[in-house]
Image (cartoon, rainbow, N blue to C red):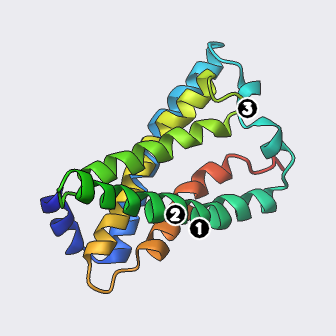
Amino acid sequence: MAALVSRLVQIPTLKLILAMWALVTLSDVVLLGLLFVSIDLGMLDEDGLGGDFLASLSFAELALIAMVLAPILETLIFQGALLLLAKKLTEWVGRSESWLPAFLITSLTFAAVHATNAEDARSIYGLLNAATRIPGGIALTLLAIVQRARRGGFPLLSVSVLHGLINLPLTMLYLPPE
């Protein structure tokens, strides 16, 4: 983990954010594509997607929540508080300086919590939603660690920007038809 972080620290922040965004977007296309193919084949019912809350929002409200408010709040919770708490526990209990345990805990918790965005977190939609969030959780947490390792880094700002970009294509799926 330390070798990866030291390599990524050498990449300018904006270039790193754009590269991570491209990789997560590519994974979203593949994973969400599987979901939509399953719906088209009649294997899943699309009524379980999104839930009543998303349906009640205007596109502007959804965009504000998904691309600004949620990224800031979730960055503070996951890549701020949880990541640092897990790192401190790793240092205290495991006597280790490694970011790896904190990275795994934060990335997987981020993905698991997103299963609750489906109306029933125990449904196939909740599971698929959580699975599609794993690459994003990995990228966001890795960026937070890299920014903390970088002299003069901005972990909360950088991660919030990346998170908003990650949510952009998903938000566009909810664009109202003309």
Question: With respect to residue 43, does 80 lie above or below?
Answer: below
**Residue type of the residue flagged with mark 1:** Ile
Mark 1 to mark 2 CA distance (whole Å): 5 Å
Estimate the x, y position of residue 17 in percent, counting from the top left. Answer: 39, 67
Side (left or right) of 14 relative to 49: left
Which residue carries the number 2 mark?
75
Looking at marks 1 and 3 on the same chain, the residue that comes earlier in the sequence is marked by 1
Q: Residue 81: horizontal and vertical position, in percent?
A: 47, 63
Q: Nearer the viewer, residue 32 or 69?
A: 69
For the N terminus, the quadrant is: bottom left
Q: What's the amino acid at mark 3?
A: Glu
Q: Is residue 62 visible?
A: yes
Q: Residue at x 49, y 38 (%)?
A: 132
The residue singled out by tag 3 in the image is 119
- How packed mark 3 is, by other alpha carbons closer than 10 Å (few <14, some 14-19, many 20 or more), is some
Q: Position of residue 93 (x, y in %)?
A: 25, 52
Q: What distance separates the C-alpha of mark 2 from that of mark 3?
A: 23 Å
Kindly tell me whether residue 165 is visible in this rendering.
Answer: no
Q: Secondary structure at mark 1?
A: helix
| Marks 1 and 2 in Cβ contact (< 8 Å) | yes
Q: Residue 158: horizontal and vertical position, in percent? A: 44, 73
**Label 1, residues with CA under 10 Å away: few <14, some 14-19, many ≥20:** some
Left or right, 7 with reference to 144:
left
Residue ID at (28%, 49%):
101
Q: Which residue is mark 1?
A: 72
Q: Image point 67% across, 52% down: which residue? A: 172
Q: Residue at x 56, y 35 (%)?
A: 129
